[in-house]
Image (cartoon, rainbow, N blue to C red):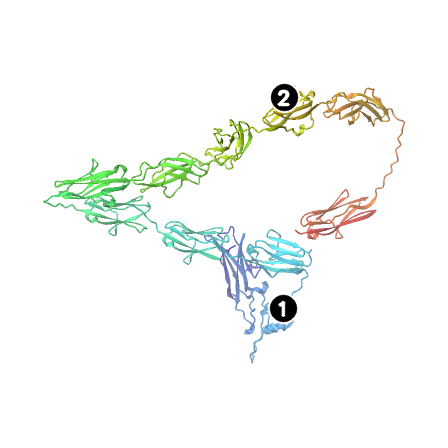
Amino acid sequence: MTGLFVERPESTTVIKGKNVTFVAKVDSSDLLRKPNMKWLKGKWLDLGSKAGKHVQFKEAYDRNSKVYTYEMSIIKVVEGDAGGYRCEVTSKDKCDSCTFEVTVEGGSLPGNLILPHVPFLVPRGDAGEDAGDLDFSALLKKREKKARDEPKEDVDVWEILKDAKPCDYEKIAFDYGITDLRGLLKRLKKMKKVEPKKSDAFLKKLEQCYSVDKGKRTQMHVELHDPNVQVKWLKNGVEIKPSAKYVFECVGNKRTLTINKCNLSDDAAYECVVGEEKSFTEVFVKEPPVTITKLLDDVHVVVGEKVEFECEVSEEGANVKWMKDGVELTKDGKIRIKKDGKKHTLVINEATIEDIGMYYVYTNGGESKGELEVEAKELEVLQSIADLSVKACEQAMFKCEVSDEKVVGKWFKDGVEVKPGNRIKMSHIGRIHKLTIDDVKPQDEGNYTFVPEGYALSLSAKLNFIEIKIEYVPRQDPPKIHLDTSSTGSKNTIVVVAGNKLRLDVEITGEPVPTVCWMKGDTTVSVQLSKCPPCSLRVETRTTLSSFVIEGAERPDEGQYSIIVTNPAGEDRAELTVKIVDVPNPPENVRCMGVGEDTATVTWDPPKFDGGAPIKGYLMERKKQGSSRWTKLNFEVFESTTYEAKKMIEGVFYEMRVFAVNGIGISQPSGNSKPFMPIAPTSEPTRLTVEDVTDSTCALKWRPPERVGAGGVDGYIIEWCKEGANKEPVDKNTYRVKGLPTGEKLLFRVVAMNIAGRSPPCTMKQSVTIREIMEYPKIRLPRQLRTKFIRKVGEKINLVIPFQGKPRPVVNWLKDGEPLENKSVGIRTSDFDTILFIRSAERDHSGTYTLSVQIDNMQDKADIHIQIVDKPGPPINVMVTDVWGFNAALEWKPPKDTGNTDITGYTIQKADKKTQGWFTVYEHNRRPSCTASDLVMGNEYSFRVFSENICGLSDEVAFTITVPIYIPPSDLEYNKPAFKEKDMSSSPKFTAPLVDRVVVAGYSTAISCAVRAYPKAKIVWMKNKMIIGEDPKFLMQNNQGVLTLNIRKPGQFDGGKYSCKAINDLGEDEVECRLEVRVP
């Protein structure tokens, strides 16, 4: 939290009766809403409620600076206005406050009496709110001053007051001219040691004050006499409600208030209230200083670039001050100050030389500095101006080229600025600056200079004016060529960079003036006339000077040149070679020779033409296929024509191109290589094992490689030591190698294949002998076939029986000891199992099936018992053997067809003649006889019987052979006994008591018991022997004698002894329990 005040009110001393105004300014540039300002006197008196004629407030807002100005004016100050004041500004989660003092002068004692040791004649702010307006001087009677002959010695009034009785205080104050009785009583109270009054509610009160750092938490504790009493916590007289910030705790007789994440708004007075008693304290929140966590760095820029100084502080939104050379920096058109959370940035647009210096940033807890260095721009001269020699009436043109198109400059002649006119023209096109002088005159001769603005640079050349003088020379001199090529490094060889201009001035002497002829090989170079437009290759001839000019030299201009001068006195000849150097041609045939997991090896052919200068090396670039962004792979020239590119992404297609570099420059890029993908072979396969071996084959099994990569696995190659076993890759992880020599010991290995090539091989550690392994035959009979296999008629049977043995055993099936020849029973046999299947089972398929597997003299057998069952037939000869009372005895014989399984029981049904409806008498009756009971006298009955096995009841039924039986009525008479009603009356008695419980405060609970009584008892619930009335906190329920008392969100005061009493006319009963409520 940082300060919001731009200007704070200051303490002042004011004369009584005068006006005083206090001003506070708040910066709202970082605030989301308008700040709220309060003016307070003392600790808590809000002066906003006292606004009127005496205290006035004013508020203003500046939209440009976003600063609020608050004013408080006190009109006609009185002594009661003296004291401490505080202004507090808040805005959402930000706040700030400041204090100041007001001292009032101009008060005097009656009779001009000077009292030592009485500093409270002018009230101060620590006297509280009531200490300002009480002045008893107006109530005192005026008395004339008596002349005193002898001066009184100084008297210590406080020693007199300390020993005096309270009833004498007013008289002593009157005698010694003390008018502030309230201040007098306060000072006496402080001087006297008052014994602390013992509190009836508090065992331990709050401390006088608590101090806490901002952002931390603090706790305030009190201890009470009564652990069940309620307390209230107040802040500045306002009750505090529990929340995430304010946490109340209650443990026994100890009460705790915890304030989390304290800020400046928590700096206040707090009270703990118990009944009529209070305990006071104050909390002081200390704001930590704002420190700089990231210091400023030195900055070095070029003129015109943007400068940024950046630092970070420990608090978000903190105010910092930027300074340079002791002057605070503020926002203007050139300087910007940015604030983003903890980050603060000073931005200087278009730095100049004047911005050089040391820059400081200050907070209230630290400072940092950074130096700014601004360097002038360097201007590169691409073509300088050259000396010119011209004749009268010719044109002279000075031309230069610099690296920056925006640079402007001035032309000077002998130090005097050249002004454009009819003959003199100046032009600036791109990077080229020209000065053209038409119709040259002798006064134009001199030194010409071009000075770029803003740079310590100048380009100079001389203009020579040639005067033609004709003199008569009676004698003749032979021609002479004065050719100087020593500066070119090789005799008579001139090296020119392609595109540049070559001008070779050759001085010629001889009388009369010799004739000059320039030749390239056997071809004569034409002479350029002054009025003709310039061409790329020309000769300019004067009296004693011949100039050979090539404008924008190109490769065809290279070759052997000769100059021949002749006159009547003789001839002279000179040979020279012009060599054109240029950037080389681009490299050719860029191609990828190999790839790795993230690398690729690229090679190329050197350029056919090296530009006339040796190739220094190459620069490489790459890009992803389909992208237009090229990435440089090297910054230093690479001399070889093979390069390994690294840090590539496996599985992504790339393209490469190459630049050639010589002493002149960099060539054009080569053509793009064909797309290639960095990819690596997989790792070797794992867990290579032998699964099976025969006399001529070997079955191998392995796991895929641990590292596959983006190329995946295309297949596997299996090899053995003599020759390759398979030429095409295998997709699966198993393979049987065939055609192996019997009895040989062979080693096998497996190689994974993908687009990148072969992986490292996985080789078996031990050799494998190619020979059939003898294994005893063994039938692995499934568990369900080890007992009798029972199926119903018409169901499908499919038995899969695995076996083992090497070489492949011979499998035979038998039924009841005979070969299995039934066509409805199918047999299928493989190398590892045999299958017996029947599509629709019949009863004749029942029997014992024998499976045998045999290898030579070794054999294994297994018997499978299959039983096909069906529903049974009906019982035989059902008859009624006897009838007595309400009973009839029935007998029958078992059915002839049991359904190829045991009879599990019988079902007997009856039907009377009237209804003809059948009703079951017995189910699952195991014996072939039964007795039908509960028959109705006078009715005639028929009976039928079903037989039953595991398939169910028989489809046919057996009826009684005899005629329906008749139950005759009896002569017995039923005498109904007299009914005697039982007396159910009983006094209340609890069948289930209340149980002691411990519950957590805030969670609803219930206690229950059960009572039995007739007539119905009246239920009374009590807490601590007090009847619970219609309290909404409690809900009482009675459900069929089960009594429940629901307690909604119990508090600590809901604990105690609960009892339940049941009362009726025959008596009463009571149960009780103890409920304990614990605070978490």
Front residue (pair 318, 715): 715
User: Residue placed at 14% from the left, 46% from the top?
Assistant: 469
The location of residue 562, given as percent across then percent down, is: 20, 39
SS at circle 1: loop
Q: Is residue 132 visible?
A: no
Horizontal arrangement in the rendering, residue 79 relative to residue 64 (left or right): right
Q: Is residue 208 visible?
A: yes
Q: Which mark is residue 826?
A: 2
Q: CA distance from mark 2 to mark 1?
A: 119 Å
The location of residue 1069, given as percent across then percent down, is: 80, 48
For marks 2 and 1, give the one nearer the viewer: 2
The residue to which callout 1 is attached is 193
Q: Which mark is residue 397?
A: none
Up/down of 527 relative to 206, above or below: above
Front residue (pair 57, 831): 831
The location of residue 899, given as percent across then percent down, is: 73, 22
Give the class, few, some or many, for how many residues have Cα within 10 Å of label 2's Cα (few <14, many ≥20).
some
| Lower sequence index among marks 2 and 1 | 1
Horizontal arrangement in the rendering, residue 972 relative to residue 8 (left or right): right
